[in-house]
Image (cartoon, rainbow, N blue to C red):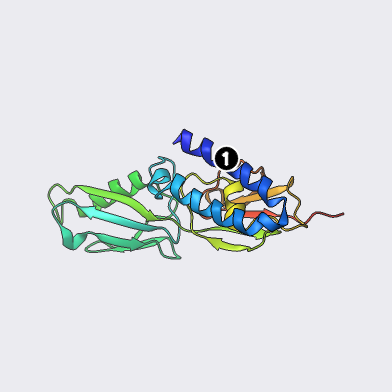
Amino acid sequence: MSNLIHISVIWSEVVRTLQIHHRWKTAATIISMSVLCCMLGSPQLFAEEADYRLGPGDVLRVTVFGHEDLSGEFQVGSTGDITLPLIGEFPVVDRTLRDVESAVVEKLRPDYLKNPQVSIEVINYRPFYIIGEVQNPGSYSYVGGMRVVNAIAIAGGFTYRANEDRLLISRARSEGKQGPATQNTIVFPGDVIEVPERFF
């Protein structure tokens, strides 16, 4: 994993150099997105971080071993709940996967199953957001192991007005608290990256 991140950072610096020359900007962005997909792979590269906290928009795969009727894919709703067979609405927001697994086991035992075995994984993360002075601001699908420089590349790179040295990030996992960021700052699902305007 650390090797992938190291390669990602090096490649991002190459892309940034290419983007200095306007005629290479489009090609550099396209190449960047392709290489990122190959290097970072599936979201499971990040999914198993023990401290990841679930939030609205995450899609979970819940497996109750031996009980296909109780298993399936469930999206965390805007209220922070998922709706599970037998259990009904169940709060998961700001909880880890292991917390949710333990809680589901307790809900199923002993009334429904004698010894339930439950596994839960994130199959799609909620998006991250990038606003301000990038070519294509908006929301984008999260890719495991992302850093701010990768997010900027996915959004088409900086505009000519961008202040590249005063980046900001609002953390979804810290109630939207905003703070300074660098291009090497790690991005998490739900984060909002802001690229301010440079005043000449």
Q: In which quadrant of the rendered view does residue 123 lie?
A: bottom left
Give residue 53's position: percent from left, percent from top: 44, 48
Q: Quadrant of the N terminus?
A: top left
Question: Which residue is more in the foreground, 132 or 40?
Answer: 40
Is residue 192 visible in the rendered image? The answer is no
Residue 111 in sight here:
yes
What residue is rendered at 60% in x and 57% in y?
27
Q: Position of residue 15 (x, y in %)?
A: 62, 47
Q: Residue furthest front?
A: 23
| Callout 1: SS | helix
Q: How many marks?
A: 1
Q: Which x, y percent locates residue 17? A: 68, 45
Q: Which residue is mark 1?
A: 9
* Front position in the image: 35 or 63: 35
Left or right of 28? Residue 79 is: left
Direction from residue 117 to residue 194 in the image, left or right: right
Of the pair 84 and 146, the residue shown nearer to us: 146
Residue reaching furthest to the right: 200
Q: Quadrant of residue 82?
A: bottom left
| Left or right: residue 199 compared with residue 30 | right
Which amino acid type is marked by label 1? Val
- Left/right of residue 83 with respect to residue 46 in the rendered view: left
Which of the image's four quarters has the C terminus?
Answer: bottom right
- At which x and y percent is residue 13? 63, 42
Q: Residue at x 53, y 35 (%)?
A: 6
Q: Residue at x 56, y 57 (%)?
A: 30
Q: Residue at x 44, y 48 (%)?
A: 38
- Label 1 crowd bin: few (<14), some (14–19), many (20+), radius 10 Å: some
